Amino acid sequence: MKISDLPAERQSHLKEMRAISEDNEGNEVLVGLTVEETSFYLNYVEQRVFGDADPNDGERYLKLHDKHEKARFGVLGAEHILRTETPSIH
């Protein structure tokens, strides 16, 4: 599954949350993850919603979730620094 396969509302929410970035090849990925990791993550979440997730994949999902969230918090922290060090002039 790719980010572009998600409903527009979900994509918008993820962008708002600073959860999406672009890799060196121009692919949309979850921040901090590769294309393959993003695909696994999104598939796992969808399967879990429907109760179809493989319990053996849970550990990998959690590792990827932590990796993604750490990277996302890094993005949010960098944005915060930019906003506070160079506030907009009104």
Image (tube, rainbow, N blue to C red):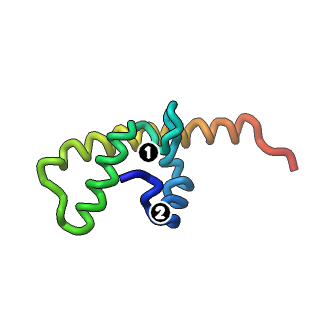
* Residue found 22% across the figure and 42% down from its top: 60
Vertical relation: 45 (above or below) 30: below
Asked if residue 43 lies left or right of residue 53, the reply is right
Q: Which mark is residue 20?
A: none
- Which amino acid, mark 2? Arg
* Residue found 44% across the figure and 53% down from its top: 3
Please state the horizontal and vertical placement of residue 29, each as a whole percent of the image.
45, 43
Q: Quadrant of residue 83?
A: top right
Q: Is disc 2 surrounded by few (<14), some (14 to 19) or many (20+) residues within 10 Å?
A: few
Dot 1 or dot 2, earlier in sequence: 2
Residue placed under numbered mark 1 in the picture: 30
Please state the horizontal and vertical placement of residue 66, each as a whole percent of the image.
33, 41
Viewer-side residue, 37 vs 25: 25
Whether residues under marks 1 and 2 lie with C-beta atoms below 8 angstroms apart, the answer is no
* Residue found 40% across the figure and 51% down from its top: 2
Which residue is the extreme one toward the right?
Answer: 90
Please state the horizontal and vertical placement of residue 49, each as a whole percent of the image.
26, 66
Residue placed under numbered mark 2 in the picture: 10
Q: Tell me how far mark 1 sits from mark 2, CA to CA.
A: 13 Å
- Which amino acid, mark 1? Leu
